[in-house]
Image (tube, helix red, strand yellow):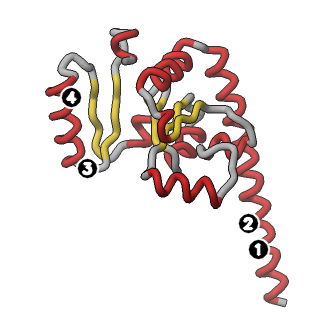
Amino acid sequence: WCYAQHPDLHFVMPLATAKTGAFVEALRARRYPQLPVTLFEGQSRRVMAAADVVLLASGTATLEAMLLKKPMVVGYKVSTLTYWLAKALVNIPYFSLPNLLAGERLVAEFIQDELQVEPMGRALLGLLVDTTQQHALHEQFTLIHHRLRQSASHTAAQAISGLLKGAH
């Protein structure tokens, strides 16, 4: 969908294994032969760092993309039973780590039935062309990064202090 809107795009995709790469390449060749995509095995951080915007599944990859200050769109889909159980047990307004850490919606999230090509594509292309939004996200991600580093330093200092007190 994004390529149909902007044929000048080039896609990059990190892969966990060569087997995954063979599957993705076969799918691309069969269904989207004109799609310009470059596959990289085991280089997710480098691929994210090189990307202008990132589409990813929720999880620790969202934290990594946030620490790289990359604008992102996040999607996640689980079995219907798992979704409803989680929804009943946990009441959180967001599911992506950047939004949870910020306490507000910074990045677009698509879960379950919201996981549709066109709305996600619109969100991605919006990020790609809206430099104001890119800069705002960069600033927010930088603030969160600093907060995380301060918390880590404080926690480490408390642990060391506790060890030193125990040594006396």
Q: Quadrant of the C terminus?
A: bottom right
Q: Amino acid at mark 2?
A: Ala
Q: Which mark is residue 156?
A: 2
Q: Residue at x 73, y 41 (%)?
A: 102
Q: Nearer the viewer, mark 4 or mark 3?
A: 4
Pointer 2 and pointer 1: residues touching (CB < 8 Å)? yes
Q: Quadrant of residue 62?
A: top right
Q: Which mark is residue 26?
A: none
- Estimate the spatial distance between the alpha carbons at disc 4 and disc 3, rounded to whole Å: 17 Å
Q: Which mark is residue 160?
A: 1
Residue on which disc 3 sits:
17
Pick whichever of labels 2 and 4 is earlier in the sequence.
4
Q: Nearer the viewer, residue 58 or 86?
A: 86
Q: Nearer the viewer, mark 4 or mark 1?
A: 4
Pointer 3 and pointer 1: residues touching (CB < 8 Å)? no
Place of residue 25 in the rendered image (x, y in percent of width and height, measured from the top left): 19, 34
- Estimate the spatial distance between the alpha carbons at disc 3 and disc 2, rounded to whole Å: 36 Å
Place of residue 124 in the rendered image (x, y in percent of width and height, measured from the top left): 50, 22
Q: Residue at x 60, y 46 (%)?
A: 95
Q: Nearer the viewer, mark 3 or mark 1?
A: 3
Q: Amino acid at mark 4?
A: Arg
- Estimate the spatial distance between the alpha carbons at disc 2 and disc 1, rounded to whole Å: 6 Å
Q: Secondary structure at mark 1?
A: helix
Residue on which disc 4 sits:
28
Q: Secondary structure at mark 2?
A: helix
Q: Nearer the viewer, mark 3 or mark 2?
A: 3
Place of residue 158 in the rendered image (x, y in percent of width and height, measured from the top left): 80, 70
Pick whichever of labels 4 and 1 is earlier in the sequence.
4
Pick whichever of labels 3 and 2 is earlier in the sequence.
3
